Image: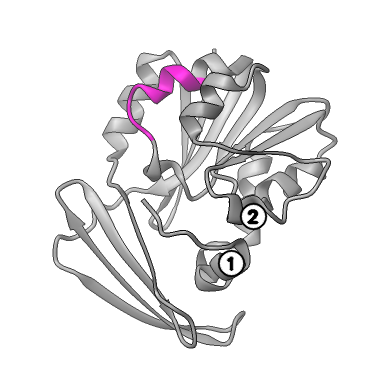
Amino acid sequence: MSYEIDSKTYDKLYAKYLRGDRTKEMVELAGSLKGKRVLDLCCGGGRLSREVLKRGIKSVCAVDESLTMIDPIDEPINKFCMTVDEALSNLTSTFNAIFCQQGINYWFTPEHAEKIKRALAPKGVFIFNTFHKKPSTVPRVKHYYYERTGLNYIEVSWLVKDMVKHVQIAEGMDPHFTEFRWISPEEFNKAFSKEGFKITLKSDGVTDIYICRKI
């Protein structure tokens, strides 16, 4: 769950988490994309889709359920306002690479591993990033200044059952509330291993990047 927000506001509020080098890193982990089809799930404003366009791809489909987020995305990116389930069920092409940056905890259940497998071409790869440390049930408040925007930020996060509640605040802006599921590394590994994926994990601080290759 997330309250509606446009891509420009989102980029400013969550600037710390939208590192350009992270997007580039995830794309590079897929290997050569020349002449291949790519699906960008939870694409937001399209930063990852724009990155893959630099790689000589055949086509890229960008999917997000928020129309205000994907509104600025232009051709040649093919944009679709729909849920992940709708995309995995209704987009008829199979993809050589599927990405989900900063979004998998909003929609993933173990059953989605099989849907991802069906959407991938032979030897296709699904790459996503997430966090591996279980949040505390005690609300945690974090304050920081981010030089790129020149703003002070406050974040409040806590766990209720298996749902993470998060409030993002920046000076001069309205607060933004989101909630998403805590998913353990064990759950991810079990779901993708069951479907026969070869899983490679790359960790960077509190972030894990999963490279799940269909074999």
Would residue 213 be seen by someone viewing this image from the given angle? Answer: no
Q: Compared to 155, does 68 lie above or below?
A: above
Percent x, y of residue 173:
48, 81
For the C terminus, the image quarter is top right
Who's the residue at 85% across and 35% down the image? 56
Position above or below: 80 against 16:
above
Residue 121 belongs to magenta span: no
Residue 13, percent from left and from top: 51, 72
Residue 103 in view: yes
Q: Which residues are magenta?
A: 108-116
Q: x, y percentage for residue 6? A: 58, 63
| Mark 2 Cα-neighbour bin, 10 Å: few <14, some 14–19, many ≥20 | many
Residue 21 is labelled as none
Residue 115 inside the magenta-drawn segment: yes
Query: Which residue position holds label 1?
Result: 11
Q: Which residue is mark 2?
A: 45
Residues at badges 2 and 1 in contact (C-beta under 8 Å)?
A: yes
